[in-house]
Image (cartoon, grey):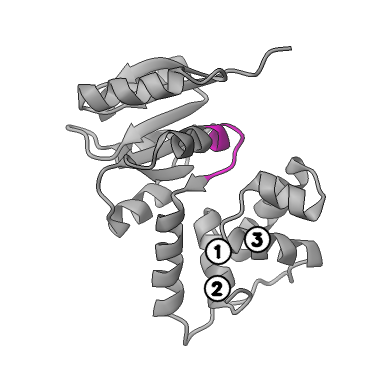
Amino acid sequence: MGAVTIRVLVADDQELVRTGLSMILDAQRDIQVVGQAVDGYDAVAQARRLRPDVCVFDIRMPGLDGIEATRLLAGPGNDDPMAVVVITTFDLDEYVFAALRAGAKGFLLKDAGTQLLTQAVRAAATGDALIAPNVTVRLIEAFAGASAATPPPQPLDALTEREEQVLARVAVGRSNSEIAGELYITLSTVKTHIASLMSKLGARNRVEIAIWAHQSGRVR
């Protein structure tokens, strides 16, 4: 049986970048670019028509930017949210925060390289999330350091021993597959624990789980 093909929509207003991203992704045996969009409006329209497994959106696009396009497809209120990876030239924290709040499954810089781009697409396709390691570390340092004096509220329902183990690994940037391997559990079990952590901690993504772990003193 052949590998499952991940259908991807790429949106970037710069033709050279759009074509380059598409070529990189199309060169992977398990990834197929099914559409290319020139701006946010085009991206949303094509995404709703094509229903790709993953959308790769640039942030700065004319008309409707990548963050708003992400919110329309993956944000709160979507019954069937799509997986979106946001990619940008601009390494600005405000973009990272906005993208994650809009529902993005990944955040990369355009100089991240082929391997990280394809990893992010594959992670998003399986419900995981990949955020550029340097961005993750900086976010954690910024948030955890800013409010270290005031620990975050503890969850009403205590974390289980296994959830604590998963939490510690999410906090240092482990992927779902890495956590599964280290704890000798299945990928679906990891996803169940992470969903439970998000529910108990009121977190919307892995970065917020990691920030809570650092702020609460679980990880140093």
Seen at 18% across and 32% down, the residue is 63
Q: Is residue 172 visible?
A: yes
Seen at 75% across and 54% down, the residue is 182
Tell me where residue 12 sits by quadrant: top left
Q: Secondary structure at mark 3?
A: helix
Residue 96 as seen in the image, left or right of residue 194 = left
Q: Residues within 10 Å of mark 2 (few under 14, many from 20)?
A: many
Mark 1 vs 2: CB contact within 8 A:
yes
Residue 206 as seen in the image, left or right of residue 163 = left
Look at the image and say whether residue 98 sits in the magenta stretch. Answer: no
Q: Is residue 78 visible?
A: no
Q: Is residue 177 above or below residue 165?
A: above
Q: Residues within 10 Å of mark 1 (few under 14, many from 20)?
A: many
Highlighted magenta segment, given as a residue range: 122-129
In this figure, which residue is indicated by the disc labeled 3?
Answer: 169
Residue 202 as seen in the image, left or right of residue 196 = left
Tell me where residue 16 sits by quadrant: top left
In the image, 20 versus 189, the foreground residue is 20
In the image, 70 versus 168, the foreground residue is 168
In this figure, which residue is indicated by the disc labeled 2?
Answer: 214
In front: label 1 or label 3: 3
